């Protein structure tokens, strides 16, 4: 609260109501400038697209323009999702654009969705962040006539047209099945590491339920931990190191639920020589994860086929564009990648040993 002296001082120095107008004008000018700068950013991104060409391909000639958006664009898993979507889009005459691709400064998910809305794309494929703002933006896009298909993670309370992926309860069951195979070797404690950005409270609840229901006949305890992410930085390495060194209770099995956590666990288990004491079930597929499985530092990984998810998402979107309806849930089955499958993969990809063509180690 201002004192009488302060009020009197304001009057003398000319900062009272009479002189407030210039400051109001200044604030209005600043607000207008900020709005204009946002429009300029969007236009500078959008206009080159109209005449963008790669080789002999003119993207302005495509029949549909689809935006694909995720906050995990740097992972090999997401690159395969994007690749599958691009290949499927070509079959429909659709240009599938990853918003902000090849820019030095990455857009936030919110900005990317707003740009897609501004461009008035024909549809959005979205791996959503688990927050209220994302739901509002999905609803905003749908209200503007832009259909949205969520991928891998769902926002069931939104107006999105469909979801492509595996639901969290079934995913928990898949991990439970793998734990059951290990249960014969006296497993007592399993630690589950949730990536905070990828599993919201609802997702964690359904995963825990699917996992615990699958192994309920065994006296296995679970320790559920959420790894918080701050703009790409997280405390996963510290958490895993505490378990490895015995600062926290050492588990028999660690379940890592994204690619980054899986690779962190693999590197620590390898560097500390702990593969005979702690077994790791990971997520997704990358060359590094496959090497870890083949060498015995990782037990296995559970993933969905990323290219299939990209393809099915485009198909779901195009079905909606054609019929104005689409299945509420399109399942992409989970698959288990174990040591036998990893060895076969390397044989076919790098050693030129043809193999028999059967995926007997990849269980769907």
Image: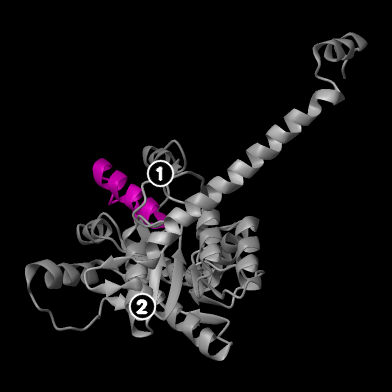
The residue that appears at 52% across and 85% down in the rendered structure is 321
Q: Residue 9: image x %, image y %?
A: 84, 10
Mark 2 sits on what residue? 61
Asked whether 22 or 191 is in front, the reply is 22
The answer to whether residue 284 is seen in the rendering is no
Residue wearing tag 1:
240
- Front-lying residue, 183 or 44: 44
Determine the secondary structure under disc 2. Answer: helix
Q: Which structural element holds mark 1?
A: helix
Furthest-bottom residue in view? 323
In the image, the segment drawn in magenta is 253-279
Q: Quadrant of residue 90?
A: bottom left
Horizontally, residue 76 falls left or right of residue 188, namely left
Position of residue 205 relative to residue 28, above or below, is below
Which of pointers 1 and 2 lies earlier in the amino acid sequence?
Answer: 2
Of residues 137 and 184, the one drawn nearer to the viewer in this rendering:
137
Q: Is residue 265 magenta?
A: yes
What residue is at 85 percent from the left and 24 percent from the top? 18
Q: Position of residue 121 (x, y in %)?
A: 50, 71
Above or below, comparing residue 340 to residue 296 in the picture = below
Position of the N terminus, as image quadrant, is: top right
In this view, 72 is above or below 66: above
Q: If the image is split into quadrants, where does the C terminus sit?
A: bottom left
Mark 2 surroundings: few (<14), some (14-19) or many (≥20) residues within 10 A = few
Q: Position of residue 109 (x, y in %)?
A: 51, 56
Q: Residues within 10 Å of mark 1 (few under 14, many from 20)?
A: many
């Amino acid at each position: 609260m201002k004192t009488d002296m302060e009020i009197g001082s304001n009057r003398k120095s000319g900062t009272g109501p009479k002189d407030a107008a210039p400051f109001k004008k200044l604030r209005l000018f600043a607000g207008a400038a900020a709005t204009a700068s946002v429009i300029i950013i969007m236009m500078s991104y959008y206009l080159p697209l109209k005449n963008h060409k790669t080789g002999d391909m003119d993207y302005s000639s495509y029949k549909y323009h689809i935006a694909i958006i995720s906050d995990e664009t740097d992972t090999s898993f997401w690159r395969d999702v994007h690749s599958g979507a691009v290949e499927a889009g070509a079959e429909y005459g659709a240009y599938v654009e990853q918003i902000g691709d090849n820019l030095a400064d990455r857009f936030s998910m919110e900005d990317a969705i707003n740009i897609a809305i501004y461009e008035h794309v024909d549809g959005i494929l979205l791996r959503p962040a688990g927050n209220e703002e994302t739901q509002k933006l999905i609803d905003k896009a749908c209200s503007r006539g832009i259909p949205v298909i969520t991928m891998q993670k769902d926002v069931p309370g939104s107006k999105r047209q469909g979801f492509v992926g595996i639901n969290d309860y079934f995913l928990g069951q898949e991990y439970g099945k793998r734990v059951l195979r290990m249960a014969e070797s006296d497993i007592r404690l399993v630690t589950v590491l949730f990536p905070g950005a990828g599993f919201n409270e609802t997702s964690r609840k359904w995963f825990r339920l699917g996992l615990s229901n699958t192994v309920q006949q065994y006296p296995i305890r679970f320790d559920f931990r959420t790894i918080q992410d701050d703009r790409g930085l997280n405390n996963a390495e510290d958490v895993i190191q505490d378990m490895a060194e015995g600062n926290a209770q050492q588990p028999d099995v660690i379940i890592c639920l994204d690619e980054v956590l899986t690779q962190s666990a693999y590197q620590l288990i390898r560097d500390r020589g702990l593969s005979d004491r702690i077994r790791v079930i990971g997520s997704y597929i990358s060359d590094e994860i496959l090497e870890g499985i083949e060498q015995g530092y990782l037990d296995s990984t559970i993933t969905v086929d990323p290219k299939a998810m990209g393809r099915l998402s485009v198909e779901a979107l195009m079905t909606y564009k054609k019929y104005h309806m689409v299945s509420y849930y399109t399942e992409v089955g989970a698959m288990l990648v174990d040591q036998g499958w990893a060895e076969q993969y390397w044989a076919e990809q790098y050693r030129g040993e043809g193999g028999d063509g059967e995926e007997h180690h990849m269980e769907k």
